[in-house]
Image (cartoon, coloured by chain):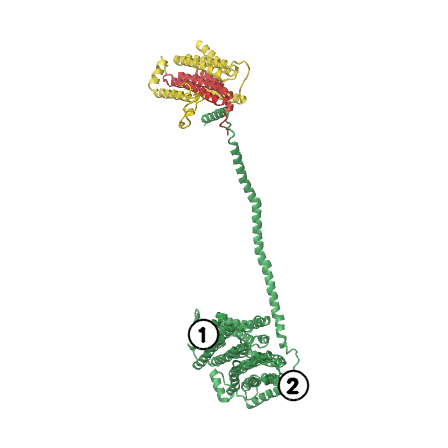
Amino acid sequence: MWAHIAFWVCAVGSVVTGVAVFRVDSMARATFALLASFVFAAGTVLLLNLAYLGVLVILMMIMEMVVMVVFMIMYMMNPAGLMPMTMVHNQKGSLAIAGAVFAALAAGIFLIPWPTSGEPRPEDTTRALGEALMGSKMLVMMVLGLCLFATMVATVVLAAHRGRYDRYGDRLDAKRPHDPVRGGLNR
Amino acid sequence: MILQQFLLLAAALFSVGLYGALSQQSIVMIMMGLELMANAVIVAASAYWYFASPSRPDGQVVVVVALVLMAVDMAIGFAVTTAIFRRRDVDMTDSAADLKG
Amino acid sequence: MTLWLLIALPFLAGTALLVSGHRADRLAPWAGIATAAVTAVLAIVAAVSAPEVSMPFLAGLRIGLGVDGLSAVMVVTVAVVLVAVLVFAAGEFGAAESRARFHGLMLVFAGAMLVTVTARDLIVLLMAWEVVGACSYALIGFWWREERRAGSGVVAFLTTRAGDLGLYLAAGAALAGGVGGLTLAGLPAAAGGWRDAVAAGLVLAALGKSAQLPFSFWLSRAMDGPSPVSALLHSATMVAAGAYLLLRVEPLLAVTGWAATATAWIGVLTALVLGAIAVAQRDLKQVLAASTCSQIGFMVLAAGTGGVAAGTGQLVAHAATKSLLFLGAGAWLVALDTKDLARLKGAARRFPVLGSVFTVGALTLAGIPPLSIWVTKDAVLASALAGSPALYVVGLAAALLSGAYVGRVLAVLWLPAEPDAVRPLNAWLLGPLPVLALAATVLGIVGLPGPARWFATLLGAAEVPETSWLELVVSGALAIAGALAAASWTRAEKLAAPGLFAGWLGLERLTRLVVVTPTVRLADGLARFDDRVVDGGVRAAAATAGALARLTDLRVEWSIEGAVRAVARAARSLGRQAPRPQTGQLHHYYAQAAVGLGVLVLLLIVL
């Protein structure tokens, strides 16, 4: 009973705050609306007895949103939302596509005979996840790790202002580095 | 609690995220839309695991993957934004029309 | 062997000269005379040995040549006259003339003539006949640069060729009538109706070639050729070939009753009418031409009445006489540059040798006793009498007229001379004449009973009717009377006024009107038909094809091309549309991806 109510509260909240992300004027508010959406979604996950994953989502999202706030304010025009503005393109088309997709998915959800399983649910889902990741799903772990590593490298490469190639040319064959300040910064 | 209501939630979140990804001009806002879509995937995967195959941990692994994906895409997205901002001093996708034609 | 050599030698020599052209001009007279001399020797040998040869021609058909009595006489005649004429020609033609062509043609003609008189069957005869006609054309038109002379050659050739159709008809009829191998000896054995056709054809051909009525006009035109040509072809040999043919097939004529009668009457009428024409001529060569037709009329009469020996005798005597006379006329032509009788006044006085020899020949021609033609003509008249008295009477009248024209000519020639420019006559020109005169005089001995019988046996002829002394006296007296009368009239300056006879009875004009003009008109009409209808049909077909092609090009091609172009246009516009999704805008790409994925998923579910 309570689970039902909790579920619906979380669900509605998640969707509403999700919509709010795109409706508010301030970037900061948008970020935190997104955070709220995630938290509500995590709440529904928690209702499914996935304690570890729910908590993980909440924690991760908090960190992410905070980082995002910083970037938002760095890059965007109207960080505090002092001016009302919407910067959208192709709004009608997007609405149409989104609406069509929702309709299709909803139709699918209610029409498809989903399989049910009578299997017993595990007692400790966290333990089961851990054993899987360290055992039969080790490959997934490794790939994820590599993926993260690649991401780190990629972001550094993309975000670095000036690298070796800027300083020494495309073939690294310049005799002296090209620096705005002779000798380079932070040598 | 039945599977369909979770899936409905996931579909709704997905649609909202899609609308955002398609309509927003700013890169960061587009990324927020993508995050919402990944969020929908997380909810749907969890529901599937709970209702369709709870004895196997595969559903949880999918959730983990979706989480990592969210993190990764956020990181890369910001790196790209930084790079393009440094180069052209813009953060609107409309200006990045180099692939035109 | 002798026979092959006899035939081949003049042919090869003549062809070689013709082919060499102007290069051989200096050599030609010598080559010609030498060849003629050798041919004469060979002819005498052949006449004595009487060989016969044959060779296969078509499947199962052999053709052959052979020298029997009649052929022997002819062969010797042809060869001897050839020698005389070529010697004369060596003197007449200067360095500027085409001597190689002349001698070449003369030799080829001689070869063909020898084949004609030795032919055993119609096929060889026909081939040689045609060659003779062709050589005659080439020789009459020898100075072809003068249009009248070339035209004369054409008239002569076409007229004789028209007559030659008779030979083709005869050959076809003989083939149909079942004459084995088409031999001349076997012709009387042809089946009934075909035999008549054969006879008719042969008579027609002979009349054409011998310039009898109504074909006589071509001989008048043939006088446009050089004098040696007139001497050889148109007195002694070619025109005599018709008479020879009739003499050869006399058995056939006798068997086909009507043919003999018709031949005899045509012959004697020709002799009479052409004699009258000869009296009326103003040109010496024309007189001689008319006289030739007249004398050959006698030969034809002989053939019609069965007097083969008489006809042959007349032929030989006439050959010697007429060739002599023509060569004499040619000599005066070279010396005085005229053949008009009015301008030849007194020519015999100025050139005594030539004049005396010419006179001998002329008197022989008139039939004055005791010269050869008196004897032979009388033999002919005897056989005519045996045929029918009417023929005899007309023949006597013709003999009177022959005396008349000779008398006229001689009177003019022996009139007191008027001094005029002369060219000297060289030995070449005068040399052969006395020999011919001698032959003309002496050949009369065949009229004597002994030689006459030998001659008849040689020719294989039937018993010759004896000529009585009365007939001989009558014909001789008539000839003399005619000559004297004409001579006195001429002296009295009453030269015959030009009239119908002077114009050769207008035969040429008549022929042109009746035969030539309709033929040409018909040809024109046929040509027009060909151009309009036949050619028009072809052109119409071509035009139709062209029109169809244009139509196809305009309508069909256009629509096909239009279709092709439409396809190309569609492809091009599709190509232009293709880059439009690539806007470079991220959100467009997202939207396209979303829609595309949605469609794929639906497809996946539906299918």
The answer to whether dots 1 and 2 both sit on one chain is yes
* Numbered mark located on residue C489 in the image: 2
Disc 1 element: helix
What colour has chain A?
A: yellow
**Between B35 and C206, the one nearer to me in the picture:** B35
Q: Earlier in the sequence, mark 1 or mark 2?
A: 1
- Whether residue B71 is visible to the viewer of this picture, yes or no, is yes
How far across and down, in percent of the image, does residue C412 sit? 62, 84
Q: Quadrant of residue A180?
A: top left
- Tell me, by letter, which chain the rendering colours green: C
The chain letter under disc 2 is C
SS at badge 2: helix
Q: Residues within 10 Å of mark 1 (few under 14, many from 20)?
A: some
Residue that label 1 marks: C8
Question: In which chain is the residue bearing label 1?
Answer: C
Give the x, y percent position of residue C222: 57, 75
Q: Relative to the observer, which residue lies in front, C133 or C122?
A: C133
